[in-house]
Amino acid sequence: MFRFFKRFSESRIALLIDGPNLLRKEFSIDLNKFRTKTMEHGRIVVARVFLNQFAPVKLVEAVANQGFEPVIGMGGTKEDQTDVDVYLSVAAMDAVYNKNIDVIALGTRDADFLPVVQRAKEMGKKVIIMGQNPGFSKGLQRAADVVVDLREP
């Protein structure tokens, strides 16, 4: 029996961004960079930015104005970002088990998402990790099929 594989450029991608981890003043990352870097590998069918309940209204508006769906995680404290990680992990696992998604693109530096990456690969999904230093997990980078350093043009 022959199996036909899609070309990577025809892949349907779920782009999920860890807002508190990457959308920080010291990084000054433009959401458009996530979109353009991801579109090099296929068509984005899901585009979500995960934020916590303390995200400024202007940031939530900017996310929506850029064509991303803002997802606001509730719970936790301003210093504790784990609520966002849970929301993002659930969305990523939904994408892993969605037959209409070929690639999971995660914008994060956080090694906590390594189990999600491993499960995605076990399920035959390609994984793109986008992040930057400081704190860009080496284990997460090694587990991914494609790594995008957001500091590079």
Image (spheres, grey):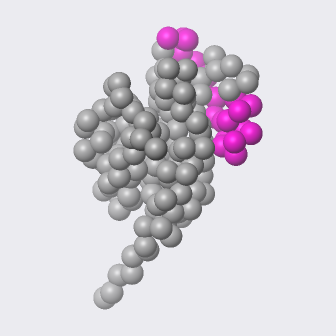
The spot of residue 123 in percent (x, y) is 35, 59
Residue at 49% across, 26% down: 27
91 up-or-down from 52: above or below? below
92 up-or-down from 85: above or below? below
The spot of residue 38 in percent (x, y) is 50, 53
Residue at 54% across, 33% down: 29
Quadrant for the N terminus in the image: bottom left
| Residue that extends furthest to the bottom in the rendered view of this protein | 1
Residue 133 versus residue 126: which sits nearer the camera? Answer: 133
Residue 150 visible (yes or no): yes
Residue 130 visible (yes or no): no
Q: Quadrant of residue 33?
A: top right
The spot of residue 101 in percent (x, y) is 51, 60
Residue 64 versus residue 152: which sits nearer the camera? Answer: 152
Residue at 68% across, 26% down: 59
Compared across the picture, whether 40 is left or right of 140 comes to: right
The spot of residue 83 in percent (x, y) is 51, 24
- Say if the magenta span includes residue 121: no
Q: Quadrant of residue 5?
A: bottom left
The span shown in magenta is: 60-79
- Say if the magenta span includes residue 66: yes
| Residue that extends furthest to the front in the rendered view of this protein | 153
Residue at 30% across, 32% down: 137
